[in-house]
Image (tube, rainbow, N blue to C red):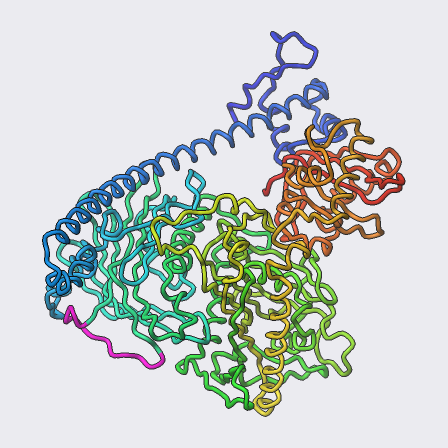
Amino acid sequence: MMAITSCKEVKPGMDPGKYVRYTPEQVEALERVYHECPKPSSIRRQQLIRECPILSNIEPKQIKVWFQNRRCREKQRKEASRLQAVNRKLTAMNKLLMEENDRLQKQVSQLVYENGYFRQHTQNTTLATTDTSCESVVTSGQHHLTPQHPPRDASPAGLLSIAEETLTEFLSKATGTAVEWVQMPGMKPGPDSFGIVAISHGCTGVAARACGLVGLEPTKVAEILKDRTSWYRDCRSVDVINVLPTGNGGTIELLYMQLYAPTTLAPARDFWLLRYTSVLEDGSLVVCERSLSNTQSGPNMPPVQHFVRAEMLPSGYLIRPCEGGGSIIHIVDHMDLEQWSVPEVLRPLYESSTALAQKTTMAALRQLRQIAQEVSNPTITGWGRRPAALRGLSQRLSRGFNEALNGFTDEGWSMMGNDGIDDVTILVNSTPGKLMGLNFAIANGFPALSNAILCAKASMLLQNVPPAVLLRFLREHRSEWADSNIDAYSAAAVKAGPCGLPGSRIGGFGGQVILPLAHTIEREESLEVIKLENIGHGQEDTIMPRDMFLLQLCSGVDENAVGTCAELVFAPIDASFADDAPLLPSGFRIIPLDSGVDASSPNRTLDLASALEIGPTGNRVSGHYSGNCGSMRSVMTIAFQFAFENHLQENVASMARQYVRSIISSVQRVAVALSPSRLSSHGGLRPPPGTPEALTLARWICHSYRCHLGMELLKSGSEGSESVLKTLWHHSDAIMCCSLKALPVFTFANQAGLDMLETTLVALQDITLEKIFDDHGWKTLYTEFPQIMQQGFACLQGGICVSSMGRPISYERAVAWKVLNEEDIAHCIAFMFVNWSFV
């Protein structure tokens, strides 16, 4: 504040050598107004002079200059802070790249040596010798990956020996050449990148490695990563069986870990692990793990029913303190998931290092970055909840869905008989803990407690449709697959009532309103409240409320993220929407089986030309989706839960079977419609839409802009309808059109417009113009509308609007103009938002 009090402002029209000096009281008054409104209008500035006598000697123009300078200083401060952060990231990234370069040089030297050894060995052996030694020749290059350990006992000294061996092998993978690492496709280098992510080539099992910078101290990083259930959604439990301190200040832990099965078609996995935490001589903190097996002769854990014992090869976390704060972290995950135990069609999932990287390695780094962001910028969301509470709700949704999908007997689940067709599995659970807080709201006011939960689940194979595209459709067009009567039944399981929350309508039966709660870093997943309006409306003797609210978790909507699992999980919530509200999650999980870019060859490269194709939400679609769509496969798993009374079990089971079968039928129909071969005519994977209507509209937009504003919208050289449309589509500013109706809806948007609205061409027409503006912005636009119709255009001041996901967007200025057809009749209104960005 003291630095600001000494500011001198140049008065417009005055000699630059003369200044206006503000007193501390004047600066304090101006600062108060600035924090309320950084860009006050002329009326507000005049009002300020009248209300503050201490500013009476300052001219209105000079106050305007003060606010301009103040905004400029604030912008410079933010830019300086951003550049400092970028510089720190670049320094840390440079260090990582130098280490990676050193590792690659060692790997090249080792490969050159092995190549020479193989060549000499081949030349100096006879044919017979070659036949008998073939196995050793082939495996000698990888012998160091699976060393034969001498027997160990279960004593502390024996466990410490295993721990030290694990540490050595882990470090050789994290910073050495024990594994041949290749860069994971789709990862971009740079200071704003996710980090350096690599996957294994040619080693036992599947392995992934990530290196990155996080703004947390090493001890905090280790604490978060050890709490695996908080960030690894596939992790059901981690039980610490025993803890042993070591003489060097480290800790040995014996762990039993269980992982959920991702689909109904495969059993769950479990691990019997040793975890070793220690500090290296250079001050780095290391947490490494490995499976205990008979080869070490250590303590044993007997097999557990319904679980397949998988193996974790030496893995862990190397955490180095970073200059200036924060940590540089190396993460290695290396597993043998026993793919023999799953059907042939699912084995690519269990043999994919890319899938392991996405759901485990990158998930750990993403959690660290998310928490670091929250620590550096602690906020409370507009819903009155801290980010940790929202993460807890996300975790409960995901965990509840996994529990229902797996149906473990120790959780109280038991299987019902089928109806002669085994396509849908029915499970029932009457454990009291599952029923706490659930009740039916009977119309006469007398609640009847539900005493059981039923889960209907099924899996299906999908072909030729990207999981992200299908999931977005299921999210944005619920009416295409959901039955409002079933939704009304589900709503009765909680104390339904009006939440009174604002939202953005994106379509759906009766009305579907999305109320965003939170987005994780890199927007990998979003948590939102869905309001379904008028569900069950028109039913006779209905006992259900007309509006229903769902807490919904959506993830995996990025088509460019290779190997990503796409999920849409939701649960009815009551009016209180408490953090501990009872949840019965249901939903969809779509797992890609043919990523097409896993590291089967170290020489594989990305098809950059095909990667430039435009996706429906601004993402770049890899050539895999467009060129090899015929081999694209994924497995969708569906699980829906219902609370009921025991005497209604058969009726509810029959209803649930039919409902899941109808959803399967709807999904199959939608998948066919969304296949890449059809999307070009449905506004899907290959915009810009080159239809005659789109070409004509693009020409009308540009012609009307030139007529009304006297300047060109596009750069010179855009001749021909197709060229105009292409240039308009790739325009850096968001350009969109809305209809001339009492309630205008969007009819067209270029790529930047779709990115800004966070929607697709398919869902664009479900968004009304009113929904993207706040009350002030809508009133301003409403007052300018007559000028647009009479004069042909209007220039709007910068402000704030919101996307279809509810995220606030700032824009520097906007232009609205009337689009005329060839008969000079108003066809629609076009808007251009200049220099927009998410706040």
Q: Between 429 and 95, which is closer to the camera in this rendering? A: 95
Q: Quadrant of the C terminus?
A: top right
Q: Position of residue 73 (x, y in %)?
A: 55, 26
Residue at 29% across, 48% down:
319
Where 570 sits versus 616, above or below?
A: below
Per the rendered image, the range of residues in magenta is: 294-306
Outermost residue toward the bottom in this view:
647
- Quadrant assignment, res 214: top left
Residue at 79% across, 31% down:
706
Count of picture labels: 0
Q: Is residue 160 visible?
A: no
Where 582 sits versus 731, above or below?
A: below
Residue at 58% across, 87% down:
645
Q: Between 567 and 428, which is closer to the camera in this rendering? A: 567
Q: Position of residue 433 (x, y in %)?
A: 47, 79
Q: Is residue 479 visible?
A: yes
Question: Is 233 situated left or right of 176 in this image?
Answer: right
Is 298 contained in the magenta span?
Answer: yes
Q: Between 564 and 437, which is closer to the camera in this rendering? A: 564
Question: Is 395 situated left or right of 199 in this image?
Answer: right
- Quadrant assignment, res 38: top right
Q: Between 263 and 499, which is closer to the camera in this rendering? A: 263
Q: Position of residue 20 (x, y in %)?
A: 63, 14
- Quadrant assignment, res 74: top right
> What's the magenta bit mostly, secondary-structure-wise?
loop
Q: Position of residue 160 (x, y in %)?
A: 14, 61
Outermost residue toward the front in this view:
127
Is 21 contained in the magenta span?
Answer: no
Where 25 sits versus 227, above or below?
A: above
Residue at 75% across, 50% down:
747
